[in-house]
Image (cartoon, helix red, strand yellow):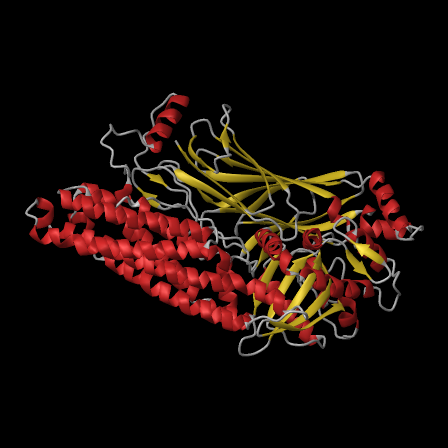
């Protein structure tokens, strides 16, 4: 799922910090400016003496700062960025100012220290640009500079100044130098590790290309892990050095910088340690000790389902030591048709099936829940036991074909990023390749596509596309192995539904196609979410969801031209309707916080239900839209909690996109009673109008978060 958004509360001691050490007149804080502006706007002074931040945690004398929870990196390549950030932190500390407080000898040491930290920055920049040789040299030079500066600390033992007498200053200077030395050593180790990690995708492609040979992928990973462990040891030593500094006993010029250093160095050490703990899971995924079996679900998001799209085909893939030993594609109907048992479906699926099967196993938008059911169905219907489940939406194929270029499919012709969807759908739905094996074209295509995609020159483009697909929930992964699943959760690729906090609003609109057509590719969905806050802090939400079917005759003539080029001159209306022209009928589940109460709607069939797995209330209804038409539903409901406006309180909203969706248009508005005013908003695109209405417009290509502080 999407990474949990969390507000960043500034440390109390860091208020009014001037990191440049300036003695200029103190500037007004953002909180003071906001407070003055809002009081002027509403012609009154605020009596508020205490505010809550946007995560609803009490703290005095500050308004709102929004940030993200510090989490492990999204993929191995981004570990480079952590290294660079770690070294930039050291420079940000601006610790060299410490050495300028004193005698001439101190200035000499500071010059050496400055050069050492500058070299660390150069190393970090080189690492980010993958300039390994330059970075390694810079790390080594930095280490030597810190050693030289450390040797010159003799003056602190003989100097009679205040700073020499103050043992805390001496320890601080020593610790900062020693910490910098450890960071420099760690940088060298870590850079070597990154070089190993960056070779893994290249080796994977080479190893799975019959014409090439490459080193063992798992051995390469293990070599990188060994260097990473050495780097972590050095960074931990740096953290220990700085940790012992008593910043409260230091002069003000040093205190803030040392406090900042301790916090950030500890964060880097903790992050790398947490990342290292997931490495055994990576070895399992690559089939280090035992082969690892994957179930790959090919989901057609033109026929939308909770985790992305209808499961029309699937593949079984075995990986051993990074080598794909088996990759076979199957028609889901072959498996489902071979099983004669009766399995009752969930209530929302009964609209289109009375007997639950593997093809409808992705019934929950929480991917771990659906993936577990897919594994269960596969085995129950006679398939193999699998370790890990991957869901891939068909829309990703367009991105991949843009990389590979056209793929020749036997005597049929070429499929490219513009025509693959039309041609594959027409051939399969029309059973052009034969009624006994209508998806034979897909099996031929996959074999040819595999040859083209496993080309070293495509590697960087593929990684970029895959990363974007993960962020947009077009790829989700689940494993029965708890260690591997913990890795997926930490990377944000597990598709786990967000668990909203207490007193936090939530919205997720989940569509389940029941019409049997591939028409969702032509549906434009607009979602308007309005919140009203009254004098008592009661929160009432209204959601309007409008769906428009954008099919036109022009699309038909475009299809006809392409199909004619491939020798198809007859286009049966039934097939064209299935391919997208037909009516779009969906069951809709509007998820809101548990305990929300339905007040009104413009649909008589809207029902209030509770999802015990996700612990959320949802409103359920059905909607049908024909080509060229629109329809909308309006729902009004009350949230199960109030805001405390006497102290000022935070309204927070998490909006989760549906996996597989191309991105609905989303509008958010907030209105309040006249004596309530806004004090802060997130994100920066949100606007407070003169009318008192707050507005925020975006799309749901990604999950979105909105919050603000309101008070009387």
Q: Is residue 651 above or below residue 90?
A: above
Quadrant hosting residue 359: bottom right
> Horizontal and vertical percent for residue 238?
28, 59
Which residue is outermost to the bottom?
A: 290
Q: What residue is rendered at 38% in x and 67% in y?
A: 229
Quadrant of the snapshot with the C terminus: top left
Which residue is outermost to the right?
A: 570
Looking at this view, is 173 or 130 the one in front? 130
Residue 419 is left or right of residue 109, and the answer is right
> Horizontal and vertical percent for residue 35?
35, 29
Quadrant of the snapshot with the N terminus: bottom right
In this rendering, the count of numbered labels is 0
Camera sees residue 481: no
Q: What residue is rendered at 35% in x and 60% in y?
A: 186
Residue 17 is left or right of residue 372, and the answer is left
Q: Is residue 576 above or below residue 386?
A: above
Q: What residue is rendered at 42% in x and 65% in y?
A: 276
Looking at this view, is 474 or 184 the one in front? 184
Which residue is outermost to the left?
A: 160
> Horizontal and vertical percent for residue 561?
88, 45
């Amino acid at each position: 799922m999407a990474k949990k958004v969390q507000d960043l509360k500034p440390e109390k001691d860091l208020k009014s910090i001037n990191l440049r050490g300036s003695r200029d007149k103190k500037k007004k804080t953002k909180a003071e400016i906001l407070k003055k502006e809002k009081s002027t706007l509403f012609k009154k002074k605020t009596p508020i003496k205490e505010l809550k931040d946007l995560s609803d945690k009490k703290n005095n004398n500050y308004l709102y700062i929004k940030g993200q929870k510090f989490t492990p990196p999204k993929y191995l390549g981004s570990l480079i960025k952590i290294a660079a950030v770690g070294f930039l932190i050291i420079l940000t500390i601006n610790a060299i100012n410490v050495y300028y407080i004193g005698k001439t000898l101190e200035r000499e040491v500071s010059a050496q220290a400055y050069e050492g930290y500058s070299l660390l920055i150069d190393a970090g920049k080189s690492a980010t640009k993958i300039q390994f040789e330059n970075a390694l040299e810079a790390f080594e030079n930095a280490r030597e500079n810190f050693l030289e500066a450390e040797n010159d600390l003799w003056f602190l033992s003989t100097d009679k100044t205040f700073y020499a007498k103050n043992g805390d200053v001496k320890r601080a200077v020593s610790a900062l130098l020693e910490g910098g030395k450890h960071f420099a050593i760690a940088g060298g180790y870590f850079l070597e590790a990154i070089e190993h990690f960056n070779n893994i995708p290249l080796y994977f492609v080479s190893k799975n290309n019959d014409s090439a040979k490459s080193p063992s992928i798992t051995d390469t990973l293990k070599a990188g892990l060994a260097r990473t462990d050495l780097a972590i040891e050095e960074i931990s030593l740096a953290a220990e050095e700085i940790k012992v500094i008593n910043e409260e006993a230091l002069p003000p010029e040093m205190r803030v910088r040392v406090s900042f250093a301790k916090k950030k160095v500890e964060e880097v050490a903790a992050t790398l340690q947490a990342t290292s703990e997931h490495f055994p899971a990576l070895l399992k995924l690559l089939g280090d000790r035992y082969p690892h079996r994957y179930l790959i679900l090919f989901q057609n998001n033109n026929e939308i389902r909770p985790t992305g799209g209808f499961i029309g085909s699937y593949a079984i893939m075995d990986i051993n030591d990074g080598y794909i030993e088996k990759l076979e594609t199957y028609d889901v109907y072959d498996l489902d048709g071979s099983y004669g048992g009766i399995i009752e479906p969930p209530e929302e699926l009964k609209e289109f099936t009375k007997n639950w099967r593997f093809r409808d196993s992705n019934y929950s938008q929480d991917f771990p829940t659906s993936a577990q059911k897919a594994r269960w169905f596969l085995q129950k219907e006679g398939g193999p036991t699998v370790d890990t489940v991957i869901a891939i939406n068909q829309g990703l194929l367009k991105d991949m074909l843009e990389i590979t270029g056209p793929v020749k499919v036997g005597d049929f012709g070429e499929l490219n990023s513009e025509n693959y969807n039309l041609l594959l759908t027409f051939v399969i739905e029309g059973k052009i390749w034969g009624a006994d094996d209508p998806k034979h074209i897909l099996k031929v295509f996959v074999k040819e596509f595999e040859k083209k995609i496993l080309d070293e020159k495509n590697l960087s483009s593929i990684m970029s596309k895959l990363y974007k697909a993960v962020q947009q929930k077009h790829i989700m992964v689940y494993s029965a192995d708890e260690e591997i699943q913990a890795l997926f959760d930490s990377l944000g690729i597990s598709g786990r539904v967000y668990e909203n906090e207490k007193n936090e609003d939530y919205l997720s609109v989940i569509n389940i196609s029941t019409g049997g057509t591939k028409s969702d590719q032509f549906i434009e969905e607009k979602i308007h979410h309005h919140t009203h806050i009254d004098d008592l802090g009661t929160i009432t939400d209204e959601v309007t969801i409008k769906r428009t079917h954008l099919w036109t005759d022009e699309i038909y003539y475009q299809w006809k031209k392409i199909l004619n080029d491939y020798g198809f001159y007859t286009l049966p209306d039934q097939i064209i309707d299935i391919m997208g022209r037909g009516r779009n009928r969906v069951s809709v589940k509007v998820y809101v916080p548990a305990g929300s109460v339905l007040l009104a709607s413009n649909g008589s069939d809207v029902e209030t239900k509770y999802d015990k797995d996700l612990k959320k209330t949802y409103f359920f209804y059905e909607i049908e839209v024909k080509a060229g038409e629109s329809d909308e539903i309006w729902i009004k409901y009350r949230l199960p909690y109030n805001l405390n406006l006497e102290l000022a309180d935070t309204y927070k909203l998490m909006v989760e996109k549906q996996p597989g969706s191309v991105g609905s248009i989303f509008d958010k508005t907030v209105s309040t009673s006249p004596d309530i005013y806004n004090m802060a908003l997130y994100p920066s695109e949100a606007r407070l109008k003169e009318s008192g209405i707050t507005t925020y417009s975006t799309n749901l290509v990604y999950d979105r978060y909105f919050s603000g502080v309101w008070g009387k």
